[in-house]
Amino acid sequence: MLKSVILAAGKGTRMKSDTPKVLHTIFDKTLVGYVIEAVNNTGLADENFVIVGHQAERVDEYIKENYKNARTVLQSPQLGTGHAVSMVLPFLQDFEGEVVILCGDTPLITSETLKEFVEYHRENNSDLTVMSAIFDNPTNYGRIIRGADNRVEAIVEEKDATPEQKGVNEINAGIYCLDWKKVKPAFSQLKTNNAQGEYYLTDIIKWGNENGLSVNGYILKDNTEIYGINSKSNLAEATKFLNQRVINKHLTNGVTIIDPSATWISPETEIESDTVIYPSTYIEGKNKIGKNCKIGPFAHLRGGVILDDNVKIGNFVEVKKAHIKSNTNACHLTYIGDAEIGSHVNIGAGTITANYNPLTKEKSKTIIEDNVKIGSNSVLVAPVKVSEGANVGALSVITKDLPAWALAITRAPLRVLEGWVKSKIKK
Ligand code: UD1
Ligand code: CA
């Protein structure tokens, strides 16, 4: 099993935020979370080291809470990317496998690419493999310098590059795979004699060549995978890239998406074929949507949503943590949270499951069985159960469980005062 080292100690000044850069989110998942999960999903790694510096405590707390096979290592002060990786030396004294190095601010890297990258490293009997990419505009990236035999000789940073080297458009993507035992000695030999006065991780390439290691380059196919986040504008752009990727997958799988540019679907949402997603729908978190459903326009699924087949979630309907069985409709202006809803249920316009008690901060469940009809503008005050076939009259507030096939209605009786209006009009 290999280990990963994820660099995340940098400040992220350009985010202009009190939140550490790698804790910013795309679809509710942090940037560093995406990177850790990409590594974990390769199935090749058993431990992730996240190098932290700025606001280290916050990142540490987050990692501890969310990722069991990840731990943070403090780098203070931050003396460069090579220095950052050297922080794991005490933890990997006797480790003999591979170490993959990544950045915490490139959330779009996929586990498929990482897997292919490590396979490439293994198949070529490489000791040190760097991921590269071909960029039309390579400015600010480290350039990959190849020798006459096309072998990777060195990486030269923009600030240290000669005009000729600046013309190279193969750049360092910042992802490396190392035979740890062989490359480890490099970290105690890095120097700071460069334009930025830092310990450059990139110098391990030259070191490897000088020390008789096999050094190779793997060229990335989809450049968006190493898109780095340095600003809120980058964050918005990355969200778009990720969304496009997700939407293309669903379109390929037979989901109809009327307007991909106005639809947002989180990567952890599964959707079966022939479901139609109407514009201005926003789907975040982990969800499972069946066949032939109709979602939107203007629907909001907030995670933990399971829809069986033929479910309709219409405009201005918000759903969170709910299982809705087949052929059930909630077509307009509704909130469904912490609910289990049977099949052939009709949820009238304006229905609310009141699942949250702000005084106790507790959430409670609403259970609605098959064939129930909920009249418009009703409030179901959870915990509450509406048994099979029961009907709720419009404008009712349901505060206790309803037996099967009952009618429940809390509305004041209608009074009709004939001629009342005319009697009030002054002659
Ligand atoms: C680095 C590479 C460059 C490559 C680019 C890809 C070096 C010297 N250069 O440049 O060749 O093209 O990434 O994006 O490695 N970090 C720490 N501790 C430090 C310094 C940095 O954890 O002391 C982290 C940062 O938080 C960031 C990552 O390392 O996540 C990269 O650092 P950054 O300064 O952005 O490197 P670049 O200058 O972009
Ligand atoms: Ca830098």
Image (tube, rainbow, N blue to C red):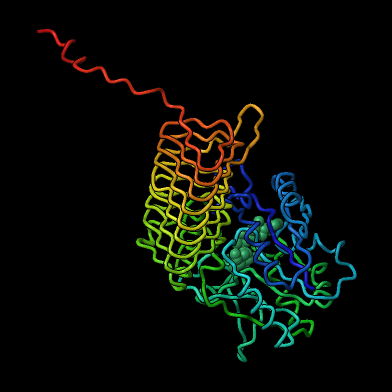
The answer, for residue 157, to whether it is visible in the render is no
Is 182 or 356 nearer to us in this picture?
356
Q: Position of residue 136 (x, y in %)?
A: 45, 73
Q: Position of residue 84 (x, y in %)?
A: 74, 59
273 displayed left or right of 99: left
Q: Is residue 193 above or below residue 402?
A: below
Count of number-bearing discs: 0
Q: Is residue 132 above or below residue 375?
A: below
84 displayed left or right of 273: right
Residue lying at the far right in this picture: please name it.
Answer: 94
Q: Quadrant of the C terminus?
A: top left
Is 31 or 407 nearer to us in this picture?
407
Is 190 or 169 nearer to us in this picture?
169
Residue lying at the far top in this picture: please name it.
Answer: 427
Residue lying at the far front in this picture: please name it.
Answer: 405
Q: Position of residue 126 (x, y in %)?
A: 73, 84
- Residue in the image at 39% along x and 63% along y: 257
Residue lying at the far bottom in this picture: please name it.
Answer: 149
Is 395 or 163 nearer to us in this picture?
395
383 displayed left or right of 307: right
Q: Position of residue 339 (x, y in %)?
A: 57, 45
- Residue in the image at 48% along x and 45% along y: 372
